[in-house]
Image: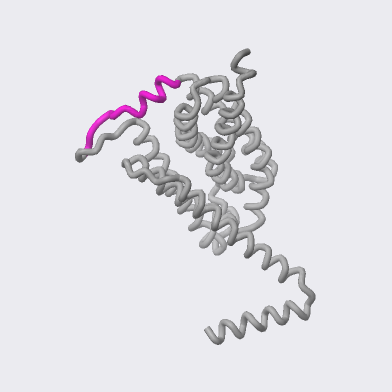
Amino acid sequence: MDLLFNPETWVALVTLTVLEIVLGIDNVIFISILVGRLPEAQRERARVIGLGLAMGMRILLLLTISWIIGLTAPAFTLLDNDFSWRDLILIGGGLFLLWKATTEIHESLEGATHEEGVARGGATFRGVIFQIVLLDIVFSLDSVLTAVGLVRDLPVMIAAVVIAVGVMLFASGPLSAFVHRHPSVKMLALAFLLLIGVTLVADGFGFHLDKAYIYAAMGFSVFVEALNLRASRKRREAPVELRATFVKEEAEGDATG
């Protein structure tokens, strides 16, 4: 009861919830890309299951805090570098993310020349859920270690995880639909996944990259893409005469370039 009426508890809950939402952005992007490969009737179910598994994974790891902290202890040494089980999980997850993002980009660029069934890559519901689970493990580990370093009260950590996943669940539907409608946004999201994959691998090898810089770069890219989408929408909504002027100006620009 004292914990409930302690102002520090509420400050910690709000702070940790915001951090969990920020750390969960990459997870939401990954799920949005994967569920887009499924038939439309299965996407909502896969999205809910994927985020539900993410929440369950985080809570399960929080209940085994001592084991999680033990994962950060050196397990073996290779070429004068100490590697823990956490490092191996990050490296494996980063390599998987790099492979997945690369294949998705290749399919987006080259798949249009193939038949639709081949271009979709034969995605199945179980296959998509399995891939979500693999990355949930990596993202959950990072999230839980952040929570443990910030807050010591287990109920506060679990509450923050539940609230954050609830927010992500609410936002993931519109985000998935938006990414699916705009190919350029999907390509940008895949580029984010490549960046996150490189960050995970680097972190696993002991080269820590400040995530503030990563999120700042992602935020700037999103801002530029938002301007591009706004300009494209204005061109589509412009009268026929203005659209002809836009086309003429672009053609003249290409000719002078």
Location of residue 146 with respect to 205 vertically, above or below: above
**What span is in magenta?**
65-78
Residue at image location 56% in from the left, 26% down from the top:
56
Residue 46 within the segment the image draws in magenta:
no
User: Which residue ends up furthest to the top in the rendered image?
Assistant: 1
Against 57, is 37 above or below? below
Residue 242 to residue 38: above or below: below
- Find the residue positioned furthest to the front: 7
Tell me which corner region of the image, top left, top right, bottom left or bottom right, holds residue 27: top right
- Answer above or below: position of 22 versus 222: above
Residue sticking out furthest to the left: 79
Give percent across and percent down for residue 35.
60, 44
Instruction: Tell me the colour scheme of the image.
Output: one colour
Q: Position of residue 221 (x, y in %)?
A: 54, 58
Give whichever of 130, 212 is nearer the camera.
212
* Residue 69 painted magenta: yes
The residue shown at (77%, 80%) is 241
Residue 109 position within the rendered picture, expressed as x and y whole percent measured from the top left: 52, 62
The quadrant of the rendering that contains the N terminus is top right
Image quarter of residue 184: bottom right
Q: Residue at x 55, y 41 (%)?
A: 22
Front-most of 182 and 232?
Answer: 232
